[in-house]
Image (spheres, rainbow, N blue to C red):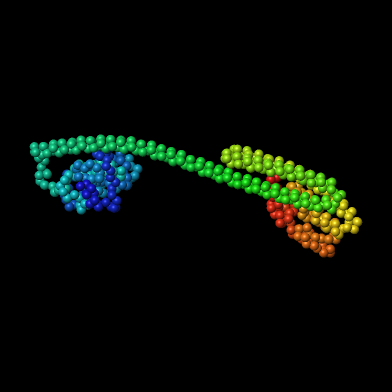
Amino acid sequence: MGAELSKTSTMDETSDEPPTSAVLLDNCHFSQVIFNNVEKFYVPGGDIICHYTLTQNIVPRGKDWVGIFRVGWKTTREYYTFMWAPLPGDAHRDTAVQQQIQFKAYYLPKDDEYYQFCYVDQDGVVRGASVPFQFRAETEDDILVVTTQGEVEEIELQNQNLRKENEELKASCASLQKQNIDLQEELNKTQELQNSLESLRSNTEKLELELNSLKKENKHLKELDDCREAELQQLKEQIQNVTSDKEHLETRLKTALDRMDQLQSQVLNYEKEMENLSHTTHDKTEQLESLKEENRQLRMTRTQQHQNRDLMKELEEQKRLFQILQAKKNEADEENQKLREENDGLLRHLSQAGEVSSFSFVSQAQAPIPAPEVGGLLFGNQYCGANLGAGAADIASIRKCPICDEVFPEDIETSQYEAHVQSHLLECPLCSETFEKSNKQVFDDHIFCHGLE
């Protein structure tokens, strides 16, 4: 019935329902608000004014309210009607404050049951209650105070009923307290489970982070492996190019031996040197195969510490091999320089004998390769622009491009001839070494060698 009464209560100033709770009477504090001048009877059809006093023990808040309850209520949800309690003017008071609220007649009960005022705070807890009263007209019998034996027995019966209700309420309170304890234990267990779940989530996140880190390391190892494979492939191509250059040089040296018997001993020595370089290249190939095997073992272990150590060893080995090849190259350059000087002397001698036209052209086409600058390729570059300029000075009578075999007239300027030859070449930006454009892979390997220094 209290729920139905609360639905019919529209006396509040706003559409909000008042805050209520299921708190029982034993947990209420009825002494914090005192109701004054409460009548025994209120005449139906008229407005009533409720007077009450706020003691120092209560701090009024904006959602406090005063409700009319039928006697026998158990929770604050069973109000009949209510009005919002006005806040006192002095918020920082230290004395009791008198307040009043007017209830409109339209919203008041129409029966003659006993009711009472209750002050409820915004937490739904009762802070004060008045004496019971009725809504009916006062009669002459009410003026005379006559207590009969029947009324005494009725009062005693009401007291017994109230005591019985009190005992029931206490039993219900004990049951609710026990339920509260059980719920608290379940809440604690739930909290422990929640903490365990959070710990598992944290561990899962850590494992996911470790997994992502391992995936990144694995990806990095694969990228390093791909880089090493690419480097090995480049080295193999470089070896093939070196071998091709060596064979080309051997062919040109053999042709020079057929035409110049005087240089046979020097050419034989040069061929022996080239064989030694070939053996060195073979050793380098075996070392590269060994490095490839080490790289495969490195990919199987997949540990960062061993990888760094092997990479450092590999780098040192490559530097050492580069230094050895550089030393071999320097020796070949010196020998090549000697052969070129002897060849130039022979050309001058043959020119004086009247064989300049035929022999100088062949000498220019089959002369030994000039030595490269420091940091160049192992066998140098036979198309160096400076050497071509020197050869052009020696054979001024015939100008023929050594790359495209184009023949120029005798009266062409040297600068035009050199510009034509230079158009076939690529120049290293680091050491000014020149390379034939058709041999771009050799040029790229040369640049790569600079990166290893």
Which residue occupies the foreground of this view, 414 or 133? 414
User: Where does the image place residue 67, in percent across and percent down from the top left?
Assistant: 24, 46
Whether residue 51 is visible here, answered yes or no, is no
Examine the rendered structure and indicate whether residue 112 appears above or below residue 398: above
Q: Is residue 196 left or right of residue 403?
A: left
Count the marks.
0
Residue at 58% over, 43% down: 221
Which residue occupies the foreground of this view, 129 or 75? 75
User: Where does the image place residue 384, in percent across and percent down from the top left?
Assistant: 77, 54
Instruction: In the displayed orientation, state which residue is furthest to the right.
Output: 353
Whether residue 288 is visible here, answered yes or no, is yes
Instruction: In the displayed orientation, state which residue is furthest to the front.
Output: 258
Examine the rendered structure and indicate whether residue 180 appears above or below residue 369: above
Residue at 70% over, 45% down: 453
Q: Is residue 442 left or right of residue 149?
A: right
Residue at 79% over, 52% down: 252
User: Where does the image place residue 147, in percent across and percent down from the top left?
Assistant: 10, 39
Q: Is residue 307 left or right of residue 350?
A: left
User: Where does the image place residue 255, in percent across and percent down from the top left?
Assistant: 81, 53
Which residue occupies the foreground of this view, 334 or 239? 239
Residue at 59% over, 38% down: 305
